[in-house]
């Protein structure tokens, strides 16, 4: 299942449809701009967008566990995921990725957020 997810990520990254996704750097910039301008509606919209991605990744993790007895990522017990937690982890992950400190060497802020979030969770919460 992990190979399937990684293959899907790679296909989406090279697909012409990937241009339709929210790019990670733009998402982070838009969110911080909305916070600075106190635009609550825009903040909520962006957090809901990110929450949809997070829920999709969590669902993939659960399905992988049931179908293959392997998780994609293994968070500590009692850790809940939501868009705010991922938003806190995202800047540090992007720095680590750009420094080559992740197993994905080609990550950039131009990559769609929907491709970065699974990589972030796999990197941050690896399974032993």
Image (cartoon, rainbow, N blue to C red):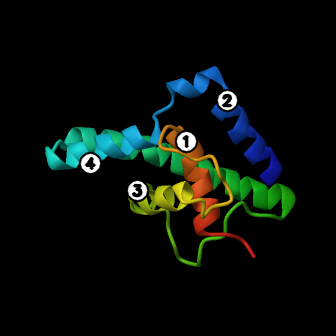
Q: Residue at x 59, y 43 (%)?
A: 115
Q: Residues within 10 Å of mark 2 (few under 14, many from 20)?
A: few
Residue that extends furthest to the front in the rendered view of this protein: 99
Q: Earlier in the sequence, mark 4 or mark 2?
A: 2
Q: Earlier in the sequence, mark 2 or mark 1?
A: 2
How many angstroms separate mark 4 from mark 2 (CA)? 28 Å
How many angstroms separate mark 1 from mark 4 (CA)? 18 Å
Tell me, yes or no, whether the two marked residues, 4 and 3, touch with CB atoms within 8 Å: no
Q: Earlier in the sequence, mark 3 or mark 2?
A: 2
Q: Secondary structure at mark 3?
A: helix
Image quadrant where residue 30 sits: top left
Query: In the image, 12: left or right of 29?
Result: right
Q: Is residue 44 visible?
A: no
Residue bearing the label numbered 2: 14
Residue bearing the label numbered 3: 87
How many angstroms separate mark 3 from mark 1 (CA)? 13 Å
How many angstroms separate mark 2 from mark 1 (CA)? 13 Å
Residue that extends furthest to the right in the rendered view of this protein: 68
Residue 72 in the image: state x and y as whole percent.
71, 60
Residue that extends furthest to the top in the rendered view of this protein: 16
Tell me, yes or no, whether the two marked residues, 3 and 2, touch with CB atoms within 8 Å: no
How many angstroms separate mark 3 from mark 2 (CA)? 25 Å
Residue bearing the label numbered 1: 114
Does 31 appear above or below 91? above
Q: Residues within 10 Å of mark 3 (few under 14, many from 20)?
A: some
Residue bearing the label numbered 4: 32
């Amino acid at each position: 299942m992990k190979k399937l997810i990684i293959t899907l990520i790679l296909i989406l990254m090279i697909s012409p449809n990937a241009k339709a996704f929210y790019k990670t750097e733009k998402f982070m910039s838009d969110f911080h701009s909305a916070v600075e301008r106190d635009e609550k509606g825009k903040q909520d919209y962006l957090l809901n967008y990110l929450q949809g991605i997070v829920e999709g990744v969590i669902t993939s993790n659960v399905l992988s566990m049931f179908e293959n007895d392997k998780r994609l990522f293994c968070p500590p017990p009692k850790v809940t995921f939501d868009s705010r937690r991922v938003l806190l982890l995202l800047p540090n992950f992007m720095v680590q990725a750009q420094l080559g400190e992740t197993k994905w060497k080609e990550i950039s802020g131009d990559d769609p957020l929907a491709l970065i979030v699974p990589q972030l969770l796999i990197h941050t919460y690896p399974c032993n």
